[in-house]
Amino acid sequence: MKITNMLGMALTAILLSYSISFSQSCDTLRNFIKPANNTYNVWLPNVDGMILGQGIQSDGLNQYQTDIWVEPYNIGTQSNQIRAVRMLPWKIKNASNNGKITLRVYNASGNQPGTQLYSQVVPFSALKPEMYWSQIELTTPVSVTGKFFVGYEVHFTTPVDSFALATTIPSTNYTMYHLSGPTGAPYSNIWEGISDYYKDLNNNPINSAFAFEVLLSNGTKPVADFSKDNDEVCLSGHINVDASASTGTIDTYNWLITDDDVTQFYVDFYGSAIDQVGPSQSSPQNQTLWLLINGACYSDAIGYYINVYPDVTATVTPTDAHCGNNGSITITNASGGKPPYLYSSDGGVNTQSGNTFNLPANSYNTQVIADGNGCVYSQTVTINNVPGETLTLGATPAPICAGNQVTLTASGNGTITWYIGVTQVGTGASYTASPATTTTYDVKLTDGNGCVDSKQITVTVNPSADATFNYTSNTFCSGGSNVTPIISQSGGVFSSTSGLVFVNTATGEIDVTASADGQYTVTYTISGTCGDTKTQNITITSAPNASFTYSNNAYCQNEGTVSPVFNGGSAGLFSSSNGLNINSNTGVITTNSSVPGSYTVTNTIAASGSCPQAVETFNITINGLPAVDAGQDQTLCTYNNAIILNGTPNGGTFSGQGVTNNSFDPSIGIGTYTITYTYNDGTCENSATMTITVDGCASVDANNLNTNVTIHPNPATSHVDVVTGNLIVKELQVVTTDGKIITTDISTIDSHTIRINTSSIVKGMYIIQISTENGVLSRKVLVQ
């Protein structure tokens, strides 16, 4: 808030006593020598009154009042204006309660005052106490030149007031006074020099001048005005002020901070028009910033109310980062300034209202910012980086052959995971790899703080040789033509048990005629780091025998592989109708990938040379597996009753933890349990699994599962009503005590009641199993 025309006495006094007397644009005229020790004299009253005050003189016949006292001044040929006077009264007695003096300015008429140029009444109330300098500004400046007189008139009242100035040794000339007496009196209305009448104790003429100063200037009266950048400031801050808008003749800029009543001065200094003013204390909060300007023997002041706050302080706590990126800074206990506060971690470039910053490791210039100049708390803190654990890889493995395995190892404090690209392939300190081609594995160590260290290790894979080969048959007629296998990769060497003759061991061509009859194991070997060896059994005979059997005529679809049995026979080329997965060279059948059905398997040894074709068959059946369903996965609470497990088809057997006689009891404890249901249709057996999750269900008590569900009547005859309250029923079944589901009519009576028709059910004990969103409940009911 701007304050104008509100200068109090104290502030005015400061301004006048500090500035005007010493202003460059204000000349001071004195008709006395200013005492070095600032000590002045006073003329004590006598019977004739007071020198330099109300006095009485007599010519023997008439009495005269000394009513005007003046001093002569001379400014030569220059012209100037009297703007103010200063005086030092030693006596001010306001007996009439209307005490006053009248300032008077005269031109000179010779050595005496001439025509009066100016007069101004000054009430005693405008003066400071006795022995304090008082300054009186002239209401209208008076232009003077050359010699002139300035002084004051004292007034004779009833009761008589008293007024007198202090005195000192004159500089030049003498003080003059005016006499007022009766009309026609010889000395009435004349001017006298003080030494013409007044004598000291030694009868010497008094040579004295009164303590009176005349202030002159030709400058323009100043008008104070200034702007500031803020009304609020903290103790260590400052307000930027600009008094460039002030006008007139200005000699000094006096900046002050006071209390609002201008009784206490906290800051007081002479500065410049553009300056900075900082407070010296923050109590009281409400203070006033003043500008006092002096010039041309005048002063002016303007002030603004301001708020001064204690400096902002805070506690800044950094939290070190792990892996460099998850550090933080928290600023608490902010005080001082004017809330609310803004917080910054970059020196005030960016601010936020929250007091927490999530930052990587680095040094930060934190700030707490409040309204007001200088209302900023700054502190530089460092978030250190706590490095993560280091991953150490084992030695890079030697190259492996395709199809082989290699164990890779790594160590470090934390969890180790193995990746191919973005796909996780393993965990732990070791990983067994069997890549088909050269592969690079990414290994990551994640420590307890979430820091990750990554490294790579490459497994070099050399291609493996493929020694696969096949002869057109497994049995050849002695004396027949030479036979050559089909080979996958050349470069190997064929060999055999004794008696078999090769035409070429590189191609595997057999000289059948030169070979002896018998059974042989032919081996094809490709040498090298990643070589390969394959074998095939062949028979050379003069009487081919294709007879064979399998150990059973029927197999279930889940029995894996079955091989033929040769009782004196040998393998030729096996075949079958579509649907049976059979190896044509060995006759091995894979049941799991065969289609259920009946098949005739044929073993054919082709005619060769003098040997006729030999053919044998065997009938075999692949039986399909029964479709088995263990039921839906379920979630139970530990306090639920045991539930009856229902698998399809009926008649199977459940097994697993918590299972007894085809029922599961959740009291086994919290956990996830895999339950297996096995069923045999008399030919083949199959199984399926379900998952039961047992939970503590801490909130289920609030749902009152056990108390919400009621069953009545029990025993029942025609029906049973199941009342579920607000529970949502997902499934309801009637089950025999041995686990068989009973089919009967179930209807809804209302939103809370389900009715089970028991009129067609064989009398006996049954279990009603109710599945809700809060768990499964089983209740026994007797039908009679």
Image (cartoon, rainbow, N blue to C red):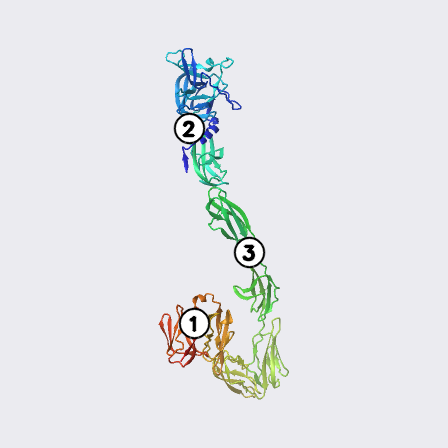
For marks 2 and 3 on the same chain, the one whose residue lies earlier in the sequence: 2
In this view, 603 is above or below 355: below
Percent x, y of residue 257? 47, 36
Secondary structure under the numbered disc 2 in the rendered image: loop
Under circle 3, the secondary element is: strand
What whole-number distance in Å separates the C-alpha atoms at marks 3 and 1?
Answer: 49 Å
- Position above or below: 266 against 424: above
Cα–Cα span, label 2 and label 3: 70 Å
Q: Which mark is residue 322?
A: 3
Disc 1 marks which amino acid? Ser
Would you identify the image quadrant in which residue 222 lies? top left
x and y percentages locating residue 624 in the rendered image: 47, 80
Q: Residue furthest right?
A: 498
**Of residues 157 and 196, the one drawn nearer to the viewer in this rendering:** 157
Amino acid type indicated by mark 2: Lys
For the residues bearing labels 2 and 3, Cβ distance under 8 angstroms: no
Crowd band around label 3 with a 10 angstrom C-alpha radius: few (<14), some (14–19), many (20+): many
Task: Identify which residue is drawn at 53% across, 24% down.
Answer: 37
Q: Is residue 722 left or right of residue 436?
A: left
Question: On the image, numbered disc 1 is attached to which residue?
Answer: 771
Q: Secondary structure at mark 1?
A: strand
**Tag in front: 2 or 1:** 1
Q: Which image quarter is the C terminus in? A: bottom left
**Would you say residue 605 is visible in this rendering?**
no
Q: Is residue 661 visible?
A: yes
